Image (cartoon, helix red, strand yellow):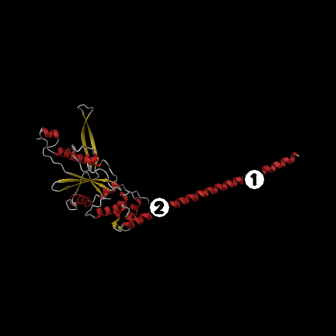
Amino acid sequence: MSHTIPTPDSALKDFFKNNEIFAALFNGYFFNNENIIHGDELESEDTAYTATLKVKNNGKYKFTTEKISKYRDNIRRTSLGYLVILGIEDQNKIHYSMPIRKMLYDVLGYSSELSALGKTEDKAEWTIDEWLSKTKKGTKVTPILTVVFYTGEDPWDGPKSLHDMMNMDDSIKPFVPDYPLYVIDIGHDKDLSFNNKELTELKDILSSIYAKSADENETIIDNSIIALAGILSGDKRLYLSAIQAKEEKQKMCRALEERDAIIFKEKNDLIAEKDILIADKDAEIADKNAEIADKNAEIADKNAEIEELKKQLAELRK
């Protein structure tokens, strides 16, 4: 039976639908696994951000408006005395402009919230400054905390801040705002730890796969995590071995043995198919050779008849 392997994006969206996993990721990375963010307090948030920008046209004081829309992979809202939007950008390839991309997403998030707040407020007593700002004095926006959840095979070697993407003189550096990028390189960062079984298992299995030591890893891992690791590492056979397993859990090394068994079977099936094709071709060649032999026999008979006729003709001419 043929199986289509899910994309890393869709697989991680499903994985992080679990609010306990979502909360544990942030608690582990930012708060040293203190239970600061509670999974049962997380609420889903709209992943689409749209903002309207005014753009100067041809150097004149005429403006056109353009809409910019961005979608974030996973967002939750929680209360820590104030509201915080937690966003995860799933990434299995190194993105060398990610600090700017993250900054744009966050800015669009703030802009979108300001726009929504402006539409719900009573503008009857707004001052002229508030009308021009389209924002009431004292308006507060929700802090946005974004991490890049990186699952690629190569260690992250991209920039980790806006300043990393700039060449600038030290004299102006203090005046150019920086923008940090928080990267969770789950397959390579040995200092990462999570008070969550699923995240810990995913870290262990991806680390083993990328370090080429998974065939020696006897850690017992849930097959759903093995399947996810197969998706994220691009190993379709590992994914298949996990979803076809009868038990819910198995040793990592056992999963690789099952994966290798699938590869071995596929190779044998391919060899068998090629042998059948070769046998069919050989049979066709044999049939063609038999046809050629028959034709050659017919030609020989015709040639013999011709020779006999020539002899008879010669006798008649004597």
| Residue carrying label 2 | 266
Q: Position of residue 112 (x, y in %)?
A: 22, 46
In terms of sequence position, does the residue under pointer 1 or pointer 2 come before the other? 2
Q: Position of residue 107 (x, y in %)?
A: 23, 46
Q: Residues within 10 Å of mark 2 (few under 14, many from 20)?
A: few
282 vs 260, left or right, is: right
* Residue found 69% across the figure and 55% down from its top: 293
- Whether tag 1 and tag 2 are in contact, CB under 8 A, the answer is no
Which of the 4 image quadrants contains residue 200? bottom left
Residue nearer the viewer, 142 or 168 = 168
Q: Is residue 194 above or below residue 109?
A: below
Q: Which mark is residue 80?
A: none
Q: Secondary structure beneath disc 2?
A: helix
| Residue carrying label 1 | 301
Q: Amino acid at mark 1?
A: Asp
Q: Secondary structure beneath disc 1?
A: helix
* Residue at the farthest right position: 318
Q: Position of residue 103 (x, y in %)?
A: 25, 47
Which of the 4 image quadrants contains residue 7? bottom left
Q: Is residue 177 above or below residue 36?
A: above
Residue 245, visible in the rendered structure: no
- Give how far apart the Cα atoms at labels 1 and 2 are: 52 Å
307 vs 14, left or right, is: right
Residue 282, visible in the rendered structure: yes
* Residue at the farthest top position: 60
Mark nearest the camera among 1 and 2 is 2
299 vs 198, left or right, is: right
Q: Amino acid at mark 2?
A: Glu
Residue nearer the viewer, 60 or 116 = 60
Quadrant of the image containing the N terminus:
bottom left
